[in-house]
């Protein structure tokens, strides 16, 4: 019997739906996703442990300027090499052209 593949997902709002789709339609096991906008470097060891335990890591592109350096795309590429699959952020402004984020300093 073949061992079930383990997948880790690193993404924002699409992370949980992507995990659900993967588990519902493929014979894979997904570990708890890393939600990018909630990620903090103080949890780096836990994130790296999750990522290291996965057979495949699916991640959206994450800028080097992002506050949590542990999960930036370049750091993931160096650590995970061929186990990393990069996907574009699934947000598309054309679906909701009038929606904007308002960010406040501090």
Image: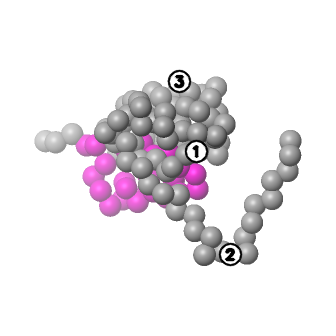
Residue at left 80%, top 59%?
102
Which numbered disc, 2 or 3, marks the residue closer to the eye? 2
Residue at left 33%, top 39%?
83
* Callout 2: SS: loop
- The residue identified by callout 1 is 63
* Other residues around mark 3 within 10 Å, as few (<14) / some (14–19) / many (≥20): few
Which span is picked out in magenta? 4-28
Location of residue 99 in the rendering, given as x and y in whole percent from the top left corner: 72, 70
Q: Mark 2–mark 3 contact, CB under 8 Å? A: no
- Is residue 11 in the magenta section? yes
Residue at left 57%, top 68%?
92
Location of residue 63 in the rendering, given as x and y in whole percent from the top left corner: 58, 44
- The residue identified by callout 2 is 97
* Other residues around mark 2 within 10 Å, as few (<14) / some (14–19) / many (≥20): few
* Callout 3: SS: helix
User: Which dot marks residue 45?
Assistant: 3
């Amino acid at each position: 019997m073949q061992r079930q593949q383990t997948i880790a997902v690193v993404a924002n709002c699409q992370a949980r739906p992507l995990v659900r789709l993967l588990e519902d339609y493929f014979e894979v096991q997904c570990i708890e996703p890393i939600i990018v906008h909630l990620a903090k470097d103080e949890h780096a060891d836990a994130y790296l442990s999750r990522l290291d335990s996965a057979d495949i890591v699916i991640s959206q592109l994450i800028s080097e300027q992002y506050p949590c350096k542990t999960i930036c795309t370049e750091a993931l590429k160096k650590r995970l090499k061929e186990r990393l699959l990069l996907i574009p952020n699934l947000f598309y402004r054309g679906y909701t052209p009038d929606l904007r984020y308002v960010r406040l300093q501090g």
